[in-house]
Image (cartoon, coloured by chain):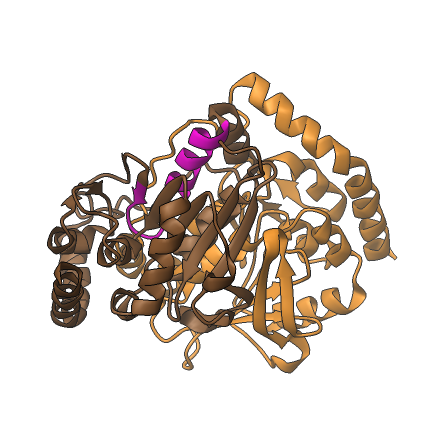
Chain colours: A brown, B orange
């Protein structure tokens, strides 16, 4: 760990899924001395789904360096980010100097599009794991995956588990446990439907059908992003 | 359920703990047809901890009615809200017409200060349960507690479990399960330290000591809020 206090950057784009980064933000901002920043290509205000807007977002280009860079996901939004050369260039620049390069949910596809997952094992949202392959990554059906300095989390709520793992790495297990207790993270889901393995088959079919509507576009955009990377 | 689409209002105040409402917001905004709103006394921008700011927040006074009103918590911030007559009046007004009156974390203390927990069983953050008593509520050491039309969640991350329970209530278990699968809510905390019963004793002592620094102020402010309510 460097001498200065850790700087943690969430690299956002319009339409980002807010819980992908608000969960980790709650955990990481409790890391002693940490400076946690929201940033995007344009800075200013970022619209997330469901009418939630984040103000005071920094410009990625204004951030000289950071210790952890984290890319959250989003539904159609991720696909735009994968094909945004400015966003990808800033991501590569920050990743080059970061201690950890990280993502939550389909943010892993954006890391992939930036060329940051070549030869790496990685997690992403369960519905989109195979889309990591065109970027040279090996999808892993785990909630948090570490490979070298790349730490990736699964879908949306996996970001909380991911962030506690990152805190443990940075500041030790006791600090992570204290944060876990403070945010009362003793989860008790009312149903056991949070993964494709445990969800009732009819529920899985329903969610797969909903995702199928965007799968064709997403596959096409991943192919395009992977082709650009190879060029 | 009324004929119109459900309107869900998160009643915010400066310094609110963001995950108390961003977690439930992610879940509830997936409820088919739901209109989810962030609102505060002044509207505009609300600052949460850790440098996160929410823009486009509505004024509580501009919201005519809602189906669900939810009050999140915050550290010192909750105490200000408990003693803010304008905020409490708006909360009472919306609660009077709402199908469900709800809170996450220390938001329960604000419901209490508004006189909405008299004679009710309620959950709140584990560290502050006894502070529900002066408001005439019975603290319950559970993650989600329902008593009549009042549904309260425990600390911070309990908001996700809370919101899935609310969706199940509103739209049925299958809709809640589909949302759970979509947000991959199959939690796997890296430690078992999320409740005072399971945390290592040294960790519990450390968090209790940190909370003790604000406990004296908070107890005084709860007493003041309870006294006003009795007047």
The front one of A94 and B44 is A94
Q: Does the magenta stretch include residue A163?
A: yes
Q: Residue at x 51, y 62 (%)?
A: A62
- Magenta stretch containing residue B83, yes or no? no
Q: In this view, does B208 lie above or below B158?
A: above
Residue A214 sits in quarter: bottom left
Q: Quadrant of residue B132?
A: top right
In the image, A216: left or right of B50? left
> Is A31 left, or right, of A109 in this rendering?
right
Residue A182 vertical placement versus A212 (above, below) = above
Q: Where is residue A184 in the image (x, y as percent from the top left)?
A: 52, 37
Residue A36, percent from left and from top:
54, 50
- In the image, B63 versus A126, the foreground residue is A126
What residue is drawn where x is 12% and y is 52%?
Answer: A130
Residue beneath the point at 41% across and 44% down: A98
- Secondary structure predominantly adopted by residues drawn in magenta: helix
Magenta-drawn segment: A151-171
Q: Which of B136 and B72 is in front in this view?
A: B72
* Depth check, front residue: A77 or B216: A77
Provide residue A34's location: percent of width, then percent of height: 57, 42
One can see residue A92 in this view? yes
Q: Which residue is drawn at 36% across and 47% down?
A: A96
Q: Can residue B166 be seen in this view?
A: no
Q: Which residue is the extreme one toward the right?
A: B231
Quarter that holds the C terminus of chain B: bottom right
Residue lying furthest top: B201
Q: In which quarter of the image is the N terminus of chain B?
A: bottom left
- Residue A10: percent from the left, percent from the top? 44, 54
């Amino acid at each position: 760990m460097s001498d200065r206090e850790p700087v943690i950057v969430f690299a956002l784009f319009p339409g980002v899924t807010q819980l992908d980064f608000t969960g980790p933000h709650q955990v990481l901002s409790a890391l002693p001395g940490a400076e946690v920043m929201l940033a995007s290509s344009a800075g200013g205000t970022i619209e997330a789904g469901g009418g939630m807007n984040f103000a005071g977002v920094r410009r990625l280009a204004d951030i000289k360096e950071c210790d952890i860079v984290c890319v959250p996901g989003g539904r159609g939004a991720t696909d735009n980010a994968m094909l945004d050369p400015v966003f990808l260039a800033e991501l590569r620049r920050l990743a080059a100097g970061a201690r950890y390069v990280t993502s939550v949910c389909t943010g892993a596809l954006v890391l992939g599009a930036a060329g940051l997952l070549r030869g790496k094992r990685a997690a992403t949202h369960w519905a989109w794991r195979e889309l990591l392959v065109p970027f040279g990554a090996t999808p892993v059906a785990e909630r948090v995956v570490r490979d070298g300095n790349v730490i990736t989390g699964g879908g949306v709520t996996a970001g909380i588990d991911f962030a506690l793992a990152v805190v443990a790495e940075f500041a030790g297990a006791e600090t992570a446990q204290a944060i876990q207790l403070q945010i009362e993270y003793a989860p008790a889901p009312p149903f056991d439907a949070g993964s494709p393995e445990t969800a009732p088959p009819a529920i899985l079919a329903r969610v797969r059908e909903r995702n199928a509507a965007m799968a064709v576009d997403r596959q096409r955009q991943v192919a395009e992003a992977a082709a650009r990377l190879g060029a």
